[in-house]
Image (cartoon, rainbow, N blue to C red):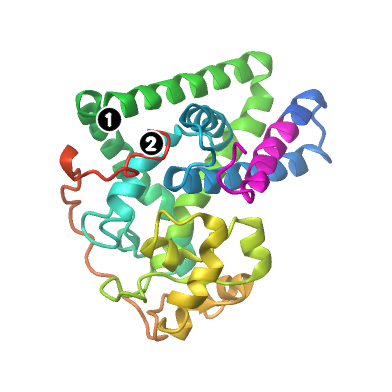
């Protein structure tokens, strides 16, 4: 009765697994044979919590707004960043201005000779501009949208308290089981943007995003592989994406932008031949980076869910 969609029981289970493994890691002594495995498992679930963060700022989990705000506090601790800070760079910049100068996450910001370097360093290349834009946006919203700003501040304080407690309890475990997983989650959720949009046609109504339709990868990542239909209908719950993708996008999309095997695509894109290509398979050279353009909308231009589902 509380959840809008029963599929989000899986989201709640993933969040619980993150905290369960984190608690286990703090309970057990550090060891050369167990610690690396725990770091990897916690990093995986932290990344999944980043995906859940992405989902919940578009479509809230619960009918109760109070519970949705609480869940954002919980996700902040598991993802490693204030959930509300996901909104400016993603909802307002990336979604509304995909691959343009107003998109802080446009893939043209990286242009290394080896494509694997583009993927590896993408998050760190776009991170500084996103951080500075978030700070500037927060200053603007402090007076324009005080409810959103208050939620951002609560999430920031909660995360700081979590880090301080983890530091006091055991600083080594804090670095291993908190800092590393949270950095991995941030790298992963921003880095997937490179795979999903590089070489695509931002002017096309269908070919603006690369999709991965494999069942396993989408079960694990809450259908994050169906990225094109998500851009077309950002307020559609993640559990409904495969069906709508098949009806409204699959008949018209370029075949190269519908990949059914995620590992195979990664091998081709970053190992062999490991070249940057456009949707038609030709060598792709991105446009010059250029300066970021103004993207902050006026208050009257903001939609009901532009600032996140909880606000």
What residue is at 47 percent from the left and 61 percent from the top? 119
- Main SS category, magenta section: helix
**How many residues crowd mark 1 within 10 Å: few (<14), some (14–19), many (20+)?**
many
Of residue 299 and residue 169, the one placed in the foreground of this image is: 299
Residue 23 on image: x %, y %:
74, 27
Q: CA distance from mark 2 to mark 1?
A: 9 Å
Q: Is residue 99 left or right of residue 188?
A: left
Q: Quadrant of the N terminus?
A: top right
What residue is at 35 percent from the left and 44 percent from the top? 305
Q: Quadrant of residue 41?
A: top right
What residue is at 50 percent from the left and 20 percent from the top? 158
**Vertical order, 33 against 68 (above or below):** below
Residue 95 on image: x %, y %:
32, 56
What residue is at 68 percent from the left and 65 percent from the top? 216
**Vertical order, 139 against 241 (above or below):** above
Q: Quadrant of the C terminus?
A: top left
Residue 138 is labelled as 1
Instruction: Specify start and end residues of the magenta stretch as a single range.
Output: 1-22
**How many residues crowd mark 2 within 10 Å: few (<14), some (14–19), many (20+)?**
many
Tell which circle, 2 or 1, labels the residue nearer the N-terminal end. Answer: 2
Furthest residue toward front: 1
- In contact (CB < 8 Å): disc 2 and disc 1: yes
Is residue 298 shown to the viewer in this render? Answer: no
Residue bearing mark 2: 85
In the image, residue 15 lies in the stretch drawn in magenta? yes
In the image, residue 140 lies in the stretch drawn in magenta? no
Q: Quadrant of residue 205?
A: bottom left
Kindly state the secondary structure of the residue where label 1 is placed: helix
Is residue 292 shown to the viewer in this render? Answer: yes
Residue 239 on image: x %, y %:
57, 58
Residue 45 is labelled as none
Kindly state the secondary structure of the residue where label 2 is placed: helix
């Amino acid at each position: 009765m509380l959840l809008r969609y029963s599929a989000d029981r899986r989201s709640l289970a993933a969040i619980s697994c993150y905290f369960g493994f984190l608690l286990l890691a703090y309970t057990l002594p550090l060891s050369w044979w167990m610690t690396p495995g725990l770091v990897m498992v916690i990093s995986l679930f932290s990344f999944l919590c980043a995906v859940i963060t992405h989902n919940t700022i578009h479509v809230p989990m619960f009918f109760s707004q109070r519970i949705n705000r609480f869940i954002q506090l919980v996700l902040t601790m598991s993802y490693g960043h204030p959930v509300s800070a996901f909104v400016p760079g993603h909802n307002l910049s990336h979604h509304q201005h995909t691959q343009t100068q107003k998109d802080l996450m446009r893939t043209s910001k990286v242009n290394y000779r080896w494509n694997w370097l583009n993927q590896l360093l993408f998050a760190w290349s776009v991170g500084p501009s996103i951080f500075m834009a978030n700070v500037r946006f927060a200053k603007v919203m402090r007076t324009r949208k005080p409810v959103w700003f208050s939620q951002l501040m609560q999430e920031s304080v909660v995360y700081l308290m979590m880090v301080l407690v983890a530091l006091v309890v055991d600083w080594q475990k804090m670095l291993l089981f908190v800092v590393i997983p949270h950095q991995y989650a941030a790298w992963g959720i921003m880095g997937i943007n490179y795979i999903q949009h590089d070489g695509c046609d931002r002017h096309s109504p269908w070919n603006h995003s690369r999709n991965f339709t494999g069942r396993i990868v989408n079960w694990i990542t809450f259908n994050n592989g169906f990225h094109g239909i998500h851009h077309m209908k950002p307020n559609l719950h993640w559990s409904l994406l495969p069906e709508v993708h098949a009806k409204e996008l699959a008949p018209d999309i370029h075949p190269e932008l519908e990949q059914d095997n995620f590992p195979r695509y990664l091998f081709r894109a970053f190992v062999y031949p490991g070249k940057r290509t456009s949707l038609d398979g030709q060598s792709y050279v991105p446009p010059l980076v250029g300066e970021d353009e103004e993207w902050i909308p006026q208050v009257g231009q903001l939609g009901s869910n532009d600032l996140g589902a909880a606000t």
